Amino acid sequence: MSRIEQAFARLGKSGDKGLVVYLTAGDPNRRGSLAYLCGAAEGGADILEVGIPFSDPMADGPTIQAAFRRSLAGGMTTGRALSLVSSFRKKHDTPVVIFGYYNPFLQYGIRDFCRDARSAGADGILVVDLPLEEGGEMTPEAKRSGLDWIPLVSPTSGGDRVRRAAAVGSGFLYLISVTGITGARKSLPPRLPEWTREVKAQSRLPVAVGFGISHPAMAKKAVTHADAAVVGSACVRMVERYGTSRQGPGALRRFVQSLKKAMR
């Protein structure tokens, strides 16, 4: 079993719900980024998503776009992001999913990237802008390298597409809660429970709901029918707020603790 599968197995046995925390590699800088990742892990995140900064993040809203700009301005690259994962892995066993867009991976070299990501200690990969039909090169390479392939589905995905995505993927299935970009929102879509039940019925994988979850009450509501909640922009906002302050990682740790507490 992969670390991701082990995490969901433990959650299943305890009856708890999972928390997936997203942070951008290199934000606010390399050293600070590592400290924030460790803070999230120490706060109880079950899985971490480490975002590879990209200049044209079409699925991400203003908060993560700004984090990408800060990271790229600081000199973060795909290779340096993998080095960051390696440094994190020396400190924590929390599963890590590389989150990003296809172009940086293609430029790096698909086979080399998957091999190096696994060597760095990553456990899975999620490619935001790679449709199911276009994964013929990268999906096999990820699996060959020992990475879980995390598929994405949305409220507009029909049952057949959900089944196909779940059949190809491993680790967990990421259910986008809205037909839009990332970003903290005040409420979840009214039909989210219905969508989640429909996806769960079609998936052999655990289902994690993301996009828009901004506070503990929303995280609790999101996992009513799902196995995990993904919290990204709300965590990135804390990095933006505290920057390189020594207080930042601790503040993020407490926020993650509050999310986990609400989800129990």
Image: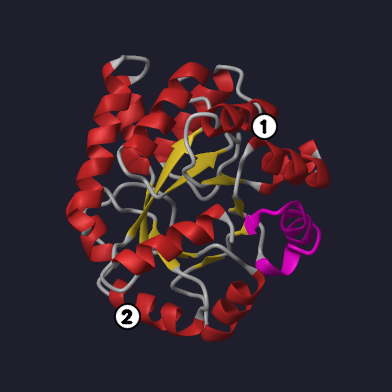
- Residue occupying image coordinates x 24% and y 48%: 259
Q: Earlier in the sequence, mark 1 or mark 2?
A: 1
* In this picture, residue 129 sits left or right of residue 9: right
Check disc 1 and report its element: helix, strand or loop: helix
Residue 93 against residue 156 in the figure, above or below: above
Residue 3 visible somewhere in the drawing: yes
Q: Quadrant of residue 32?
A: top left
Residue 39 against residue 185 in the figure, above or below: above
Magenta residues, start to end: 132-148
Q: What residue is pinned by disc 1? A: 78
- Residue occupying image coordinates x 54% and y 29%: 90
Question: Relative to the observer, which residue lies in front, 149 or 91?
Answer: 91
x, y percentage for residue 11?
A: 36, 62
Amino acid type, residue under disc 1 in the picture = Thr
x, y percentage for residue 97?
A: 55, 47
Check disc 2 and report its element: helix, strand or loop: helix
| Label 1–label 2 contact, CB within 8 A | no
- What's the mark number on residue 230? none
Amino acid type, residue under disc 2 in the picture = Glu
- Label 1, label 2: how many angstroms apart (C-alpha)? 38 Å
Q: What residue is pinned by disc 2? A: 194
Question: Relative to the observer, which residue lies in front, 88 or 190?
Answer: 88
Disc 2: CA contacts within 10 A as few (<14), some (14-19) or many (>=20): few
Residue 179 visible somewhere in the drawing: no
Query: Please, what is the dominant secondary structure of the magenta stretch?
Result: helix
- Residue occupying image coordinates x 65% and y 25%: 80
Disc 1: CA contacts within 10 A as few (<14), some (14-19) or many (>=20): many
Q: Quadrant of residue 247?
A: top left
Per the image, is 227 magenta?
no
- Residue occupying image coordinates x 27% and y 51%: 185
x, y percentage for residue 77?
A: 65, 27
